Amino acid sequence: MSYVLRHNPDAFGLSLDAQGWCKVSDLLAAFKEKGTPITREYLEEVVDTNDKKRFAFSEDGKMIRASQGHSIRIDLGYTPEVPPEILYHGTAKRNLDSIFKEGLQKRNRHHVHLSPDLDTAIKVGQRHGKVVVPKVKAKEMHVLGFEFYRSQNGVWL
Ligand code: HQG
């Protein structure tokens, strides 16, 4: 689901609307077409129990999207928010020199992803190697004019 709803809907013959939403009926049909049929109930379980609450239904339940993490161009429609004083960015130790030289880059994603707490940031960083967690003076950046958004599942962008 992350692959289809964040990176490559084409691969499943799907297209997302400007805000990244996909019709639930289309998604179910696409999974069936690919030989891995899932039910609406199963999808609801995924949305409810996914460890990071990565996916959300629209209010009427007819659409689904990933709440963050996209590489394809969509507008999640989040409005800028004042961030907390400090946010955390878990990354690999080997990236540090380059981060301090170039700044944090969004790489393939839409935004730089920041965690509200240290534990989450450690988990994010561990995916990349020996973890380090630079603190980001988010409030100070906000004052300087950087925009911060909070995704529906609590990731700071
Ligand atoms: C690094 C997961 C060198 C950056 C997580 C990171 C998150 C640099 C990597 C979400 C750099 C990009 C995003 C620079 C950035 N020099 N390295 N100047 N600037 N980097 O996966 O933040 O499980 O695209 O530190 O929980 O690790 O997918 O970003 O290591 O919320 O739901 O470039 O993905 O969520 O890696 O993770 P990623 P991320 P999901």
Image (cartoon, helix red, strand yellow):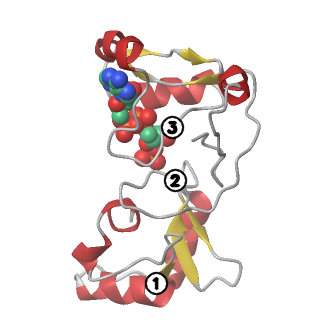
Percent x, y for residue 157? 57, 41
Ligand 1 located in image quadrant: top left
**Looking at the image, is mark 1 or mark 3 nearer the viewer?**
3
Q: CA distance from mark 1 to mark 3?
A: 31 Å
The reply to whether discs 1 and 3 touch (Cβ–Cβ < 8 Å) is no
Q: Is residue 157 left or right of residue 98?
A: right
What SS does tag 1 mark?
loop
**Looking at the image, is mark 2 or mark 1 nearer the viewer?**
2
Q: Nearer the viewer, residue 149 or 119?
A: 149
The residue singled out by tag 1 in the image is 39
Query: Is 55 placed above or below 90 here?
Result: below
Residue type at mark 1 is Thr
Q: Earlier in the sequence, mark 2 or mark 1?
A: 1
Residue pictured at 36% horizontal, 90% vertical: 29
Residue type at mark 3 is His
Q: CA distance from mark 3 to mark 2?
A: 9 Å
Residue pictured at 58% horizontal, 54% vertical: 53
Percent x, y for residue 99? 38, 17
Q: Is residue 127 visible?
A: no
